[in-house]
Image (tube, rainbow, N blue to C red):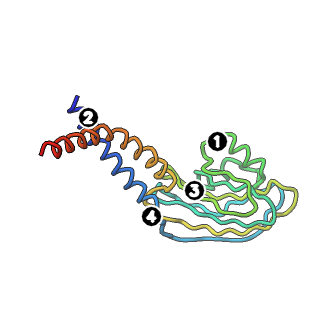
Amino acid sequence: MKRWITFLGRGGTVLVAIGFALLLVSFFPSAQLGSTGGSGSIIPEMFETHFERVLTPQQGLEITITADGTLTVYILEVSSQTIYNWIGDYNNSITGLEEFLEANPDSIGLQKDMSEGEIEYIPTKVTNATLILSNPGSKRTNWEFEAYITAIIAPGTKVRNLAQWTIPIGFVLALPWLAQLWKEKTMRTGAH
């Protein structure tokens, strides 16, 4: 029994150390690799592609959007050519985009209705990332966006969540071992 307590206790201390290391890494800031931006307007019931890049899980997109109406912002994990080949004669209408998305729901990396704000996208695999702005409204919408490609060590939120589980589990595993060590130490000091 003592051997198992020692084994689990040491494993627990390793988990605690790994958890704190992950927590530390999650706070490292990302580095900007490049940026792009644009402005324009979209007529009702139409969409536009504005950015396409192959990204890895160590890269992300941070996008700031300002519009005078509500836009549906998509980051699709396919090339723009794939979208246009699929929708064919629809000529950038939302109808063609919606049909593409219904047939290919796994291509949606991010979807958000917004008029202004920031979005962050970090892929889980090497993938194309195509930014699409869509106007589901009934009036022309003016927009402006700024996109930054960032290099990251690890996705902050995901790594913090992992650390939040690893550290307590490590403490629970290490506690009996640490209690046993404390008990042995107090017995040795009491014997002198």
**Nearer the N terminus, badge 1 or badge 3?**
1
Residue drawn 55% across the image and 55% down it: 128
**Nearer the N terminus, badge 4 or badge 2?**
2
Asked if the residues shown at circle 4 and circle 2 are in contact, with their CB atoms under 8 angstroms apart, the answer is no
Q: Considering depth in this image, is 87 or 27 the residue closer to the camera?
A: 27
**Nearer the N terminus, badge 4 or badge 3?**
4
Q: Secondary structure at mark 1?
A: helix
Asked if the residues shown at circle 4 and circle 1 are in contact, with their CB atoms under 8 angstroms apart, the answer is no
Residue 69 in picture, x, y percent from top left: 81, 62
| Front tag of 4 and 2 | 2
Amino acid at dot 4: Phe
- Tag shown at residue 28: 4
**Nearer the N terminus, badge 3 or badge 2?**
2
List the residue tagged with mark 2: 5
Residue 3 in picture, x, y percent from top left: 20, 33
| Front tag of 1 and 2 | 2
Give the vertical position of 120 relative to 162 (above or below): below
Circle 3 packing at 10 Å, graded few (<14), some (14-19), many (20+), is: some
